[in-house]
Image (spheres, rainbow, N blue to C red):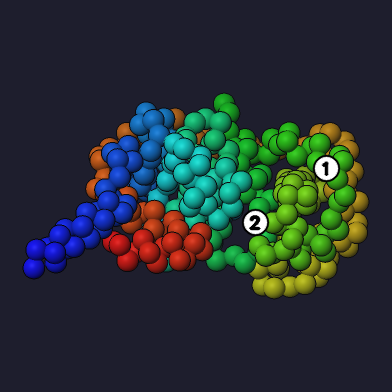
Amino acid sequence: MKARRVLIAALLVWLFASYPGSTQEKDKWIRLTSAHFEMYSAADQKKSAATLEYFERVRDFFLTASPVRPPGDFPVRIVAFKDPDEMRIFSPNPSAAAYFAPGPVRDTIVMKSPSDDNYPIAVHEYMHLVMRHSGLHIPLWLNEGWADVYSTLKPVSDGVAVGDLIARYMPILNSSQWFTVEQLQGVTNQSREYNEASRTGMFYAESWALTHMLFLSPDYKAGFARFVSALSRNSPLTDALRMAFDKTPSQVLLDLQGYLARKKLYGTVFLVPMKKDADAPEAETPSPYDIDLMQADLQFASSHRAAAAQSYSQL
């Protein structure tokens, strides 16, 4: 009996030592809540609160002025990691600076330590969330390109400006081999062009440039909604371009190259001022169980299924 009690005690020590909730890291997390978001953050509380308030203002802008609307009462969670290495453990792509993790009960936007510099990529991921709940079914290049166009949004004196140049893409567009429009249309999440570093940069750069021209340029913007609607109905790319713009894919590509060669891109100002303030979020210390559940959800959403199964089992 004594040996059995010793064995049971040893097993209990091992169990609680290996249980994720027992780590000291849990003490570093805070949970912030606002009207439409919940945020788990291991980063600076003041910057985290400012980021949550910014998300509320961005949501209000999308609700008022965007062609696609954010979800109504669907809960949205934001997770901000302080340590990039820890974030990579849960990420579907180790090089991602932020990512969108859809879920059956709630969606999550995951980002690095919150700061003004990270707002554009956070807006990019929020656009993915909006698109997921829009009812539209669009190709990957348009989803990524549209998210990049909206990532440039910024308040101006009479509204919100969208469409600034994304400078990091210009050297890529000037030096890399271009995709045809048909090739862009065929890229999926599993494609080499989306997952290999040698082509991923050009895929994102050209997707942004093409979407920018179709959405904002004077020659194309009037037909953009028809184009998106046609693609969402699974119309072939050639048919969608002809119906919306009376153009062939090769003509569109030539127009795009000329559009960028002019070195003058057309932005737009939505005459809807972005809110200058939002209610301060409430802050609390989440329980170890809540933190472990959040992290297990991230593992599951990122297809780390074995790790997620183990985490859920421990919970």
Residue type at the position of mark 2: Asn
Query: Is label 2 in a helix, a strand or a loop?
Result: helix
- The residue indicated by pointer 2 is 143
Residue 261 in which image quadrant: top right
Mark closer to the observer (1, 2): 1
Where residue 170 appears, as percent x and y from the top left, is 79, 37
Crowdedness near tag 1: few (<14), some (14–19) or many (≥20) residues, C-alpha within 10 Å: some
Q: Position of residue 111 (x, y in %)?
A: 50, 43
The quadrant of the picture occupied by the N terminus is bottom left
Whether residue 159 sits left or right of residue 212 in the image: it is: left
**Image quadrant containing the C terminus:** bottom left
Disc 1 and disc 2 in contact, CB within 8 angstroms: no
Horizontal relation, residue 87 to residue 311: left or right: right
Task: Depth check: give the residue in front, 132 or 173.
Answer: 173
Q: Given the current orientation, which residue lies at the most extreme top position?
A: 157
Count the marks: how many? 2
Identify the residue at image location x=78%, y=52%.
Answer: 199
State left or right for residue 216 relative to residue 155: right
> Residue 30 in the image: x percent, y percent?
31, 39
- Name which residue lies at 51% across and 63% down: 303
Circle 1 sits on which residue? 173
Q: Nearer the viewer, residue 280 or 194?
A: 194
C-alpha distance separating marks 1 and 2: 19 Å
Q: Earlier in the sequence, mark 1 or mark 2?
A: 2
Nearer to me, 7 or 114:
7
Label 1 secondary element = helix
Give percent across and percent down for residue 309.
39, 67
Q: Is residue 224 in view from this perspective?
A: no
In this view, the residue in front, 118 or 158, is 118
- Residue 103 vertical position relative to residue 282 in the rendered view, above or below: below
Residue 46 makes an appearance in the image:
yes
Residue kind at label 1, given as amino acid type: Leu
